[in-house]
Image (spheres, helix red, strand yellow):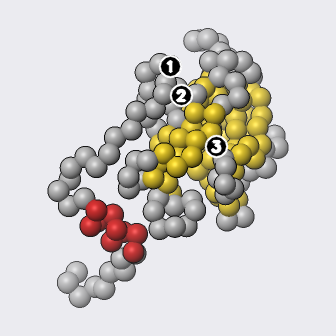
């Protein structure tokens, strides 16, 4: 392995040099109603060389944080309810980043695709789904978004498949 030339990106150099002592660099406490179950999505969505971290878990807002500093860059507030504990999911369509998330607590439960490419985070599309909450999280397989919901324990749930434009398949 000594003779292999490794390619190291500028971003990786920045992250490697940023915290050599493995100390906590920053912490973040969201406004929330209930216990949070952190599930994050992270990517360099604006191509500035620093990753953005997207956080939502039982919170009224989705937070976009600078992954190096922990500072809030932007946020988006749910029109009704709050974010599901199932978190968020980043996806790309035609080289544009979108954030997929779901609401909970207040009916109707909705799936949101948020456009991350404008100055403000905006709704790309939204769909109401049957059920009290998203059970299995949000899953993407190639061009299909799979969402499973359910009502009370032991009740039947619903399975939805959307394309990346938000159309039911």
User: Is 114 situated above or below 31?
Assistant: below
Name which residue lies at 45% across and 53% down: 66
Q: Report the front residue among 105 and 136.
A: 105
Mark 1–mark 2 distance (CA, rounded to whole Å): 7 Å
Query: Of the residues under marks 1 and 3, which one precedes in the sequence?
Result: 1
Q: Residues within 10 Å of mark 2 (few under 14, many from 20)?
A: many
Q: Which mark is residue 19?
A: none
Q: Residues within 10 Å of mark 1 (few under 14, many from 20)?
A: few
Residue 83: x %, y % from top left: 58, 29
Horizontal side, residue 147 vs residue 73: left or right: right
The reply to whether the C-beta atoms of the residues labelled 3 and 2 are less than 8 Å apart is: no
Residue 130: x %, y % from top left: 74, 22
Residue at which label 1 appears: 33
Q: Which mark is residue 59?
A: 2
Q: Is residue 98 visible?
A: no
Name which residue lies at 38% across and 55% down: 68
Mark 3–mark 2 distance (CA, rounded to whole Å): 15 Å
User: Is 71 situated above or below 39?
Assistant: below
Query: Of the residues under marks 1 and 2, which one precedes in the sequence?
Result: 1
Quadrant containing the C terminus is: top right
Horizontal side, residue 95 vs residue 48: left or right: right
Name which residue lies at 46% across and 38% down: 39
Residue 153: x %, y % from top left: 57, 12
The reply to whether the C-beta atoms of the residues labelled 1 and 3 are less than 8 Å apart is: no
Query: Of the residues under marks 3 and 2, which one precedes in the sequence?
Result: 2
Q: Is residue 67 visible?
A: yes
Residue at the far bottom: name it.
3
- Dot 2 lies on which element? loop
The reply to whether the C-beta atoms of the residues labelled 1 and 2 are less than 8 Å apart is: yes
């Amino acid at each position: 392995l000594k003779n292999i030339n490794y390619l190291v990106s500028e971003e990786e150099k920045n992250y490697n040099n940023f915290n050599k002592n493995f100390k906590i660099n920053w912490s973040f406490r969201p406004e929330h109603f209930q216990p949070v179950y952190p599930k994050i999505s992270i990517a360099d969505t604006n191509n500035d060389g620093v990753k953005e971290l997207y956080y939502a878990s039982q919170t009224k807002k989705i937070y976009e944080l600078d992954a190096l500093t922990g500072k809030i860059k932007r946020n988006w507030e749910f029109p009704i309810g709050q974010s599901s504990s199932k978190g968020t999911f980043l996806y790309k369509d035609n080289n544009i980043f979108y954030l997929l998330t779901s609401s909970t607590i207040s009916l109707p439960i909705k799936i949101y695709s948020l456009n991350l490419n404008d100055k403000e985070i905006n709704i790309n599309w939204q769909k109401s789904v049957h059920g009290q909450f998203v059970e299995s999280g949000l899953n993407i397989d190639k061009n299909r978004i799979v969402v499973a919901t359910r009502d009370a324990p032991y009740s039947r749930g619903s399975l939805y498949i959307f394309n990346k434009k938000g159309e039911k398949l």
